[in-house]
Image (spheres, coloured by chain):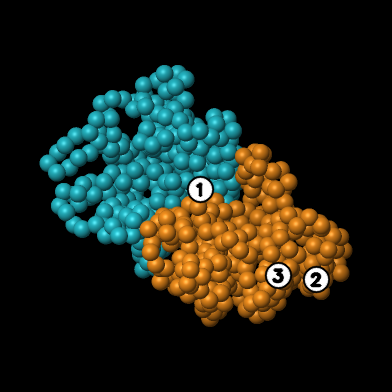
Amino acid sequence: MSVNHFWTAFAFEPFMNALLIGLSMASIWLIAALGLAIVYGTMGVINMAHGEFVMLGAYTTYLLQSVFGLPFLLCVPCAFLIVAAIGAIIEKLLIRHLYKRPLDTLLATWGLSLVLVQGVRLLVGPEPKNVTSPAFLNASMQFWVFELSWFRVFIFGVTIAAFVVTWWLLQKTRVGLMVRAVTQNKEIAAAHGIDAGRVYTLTFAYGAGLAGLAGAMFGAIKNVFPDMGAGYIVEAFLVVVVGGVGSLAGSLVSALGLGEIYSVFAYFTNGTFAKFWLFLLVVIFLRFRPQGLFSEALARR
Amino acid sequence: MSNPYHNPKAQWAAYLVFFVVLACVPLMVENTFTVNLLARFLVLGMLALSVSLVWGYGGILSLGQGIAFGLAAYGMGMTMQMQAQDPESMPIPSFMLTNELTELPALWEPFWHAPTGIALALIVPTLFFAALGTIMFQARVAGVFVAIVTLAMLSAWYSMAFDMQPYTAGFNGISPPNPLQLGEYSIDPYSATAYWIALACLTVLTLGLKALLHSKFGLIIQAVREDPERARFLGYSVAAYQVSVFTLSGFVAAVAGVLWVMIVQYVSPTALEVSFSVTMVIWAAVGGRMSLIGAIIGAFLVNGMQSFLGDELLYGFLLVLGGLFIVIVRFLPNGLAGLLESVLGRFGKRAAPSDAGGPV
């Protein structure tokens, strides 16, 4: 970075494109945060290994593509299923023993993330891998002043679809009703015959699966490497915290807000400053609204 | 007789023995490289001490102790770098020249004067912790939210240090050419003197904190940890106590940052890496976060194991570390110190009801 070219002046077309990039950032952060939001909202578990589930999704896609020759669009749902299965196993082995100690789940899942990163590094190797996406997604298109790649549009579409499906599952299905009941009061829900343990396993697996879905797509934007997950985790947490615990709509709005603020800051200055000021803004925001945008009660677990 | 683990006299005796033994180490070790390595462990132990204070006693899980460590380390790095510069012939560090800076940035000016530089390296991070703590705790931000906010701030500082290449030398970091000069003395990082300076700081801080935790302040801190609501209803200003303990832990980490650069003559953005700050928490958890000395020993053990295994096994080591951490959190939430407590408890079992037990 050069000191002399620090400040970028306003110009209409680049600025409109910056807004569009903000939208694209928002969709990336939202899909990374969605699983985290559901797991934290329902179970009160801060999953520090969420980024590593993203990484596992990317590696699943890579392996399915290079070893079994599956087409990319089929790899995406497979990544969801496989990472969800891994999530279910981890919940049964580790997470469920720590429900009464939220800070400890944070630490245990951090240990888990170390194990996953190093395990993948030892098994698959530290060098970056490539996931190839279909040709029609690699093209870019021109629309009025906007210029954007089809792949970004694809991510945006998948994010919206995942969001709608999640909302539908939670609000309109019987399982979703059980999840909401357990979220509100685990003991009373259990007294009504809901198997809270199974609901937790399902929720955690679903959250992990969403991370796997995100990873399948992120692997195609950038390379696939063992510690790629670390690059998404802080932003994903901030989306959840700003949005408000247990509020899907909050996550949506906060991802949009944070993505646009970041992108506009980054346009006028640069990416690093934008990140610094964005994080500082979030801290100040939490000073005045610790419960986040959409959450009614002060959520302190 | 009750559990000797809770006996204040036995505790003070254990602390004294511990530090006396540490002080004798350089007399027995010839190899200067080993002395330097052990001095590094002392500094890392100090970081675990700060984690034990803020997390074990304050109940505040901060994943941002690296902010104080890193900022102080940069302050010290700048101070030592400026000691090698000359106002006449070489007014600015060479990495700035390669980054097209023609004059010394204002940010660097105060570091011409070494005592001012070191003072800034200690004060700025402490003030930052005071400010961040005030923002968080007045808003009653608690639990995992604190962890996430500190994590976010750490990550923000990391990217600043990494990206502001003309000011911080970016990824390469600052490597001052000469050891620290204090007046007429030059402190060779490989000498026993450097080790003893680090040990003196660690001893003073540990014993000072232990005395503080035995005082009324320490008891209230622990009351706030156990139940903030109840402490508030008893009339204590919970936020004020949390801000104090958080700020104090920031100061301890800042001292560690200053000493670290004195000992390694190098500072880079890795000091501000997220994984480093979480690793500090692992040390404290392994040794026992509820015991100051336990946390320090945890740092010694984990780092000792790491350098014993060497770099070839590093990936394998991190795998083991992660697994160890899961096991500790799952089965030994109070770490090795907690294990010792229950073992000693067996011996003192015959005794009448155990006393309340002060901080360890």
Disc 3 target residue: B197
Viewer-side residue, B135 vs B89: B89
Which residue occupies 28% across, 57% down?
A5
Is A28 situated left or right of B243 in this image? Answer: left
Q: Quadrant of the rendered structure where residue B242 is?
A: bottom right
Label 2 and label 1: CA atoms lie apart by 38 Å
Q: Which chain is mark 3 on?
A: B
Name the amino acid, label 2.
Leu
Name the amino acid, label 3.
Ile
Q: Colour of chain B?
A: orange
Q: Is residue B280 depicted above or below A76 in this figure?
A: below
Q: Colour of chain A?
A: cyan
**Whole-percent x and y of residue A194?**
48, 42
Label 2 and label 3: CA atoms lie apart by 17 Å
Is A191 situated left or right of B222 in this image? Answer: left
Viewer-side residue, A43 vs B251: B251
Residue B322 in sight from this viewpoint: yes
Q: Quadrant of the rendered structure where residue B283 is?
A: bottom right
Disc 2 target residue: B16
Q: Secondary structure at mark 2?
A: helix
Q: Is residue A12 depicted above or below A284 in this figure?
A: above
Disc 1 target residue: A48
Are discs 2 and 3 located on one and the same chain? yes
Q: Which is more N-terminal, label 3 or label 2?
A: 2
Say few, some or many: other residues with alpha carbon within 10 Å of mark 1 (under 14 / 14 to 19 / 20 or more): many
Name the amino acid, label 1.
Met
**Whole-percent x and y of residue B48?**
64, 61
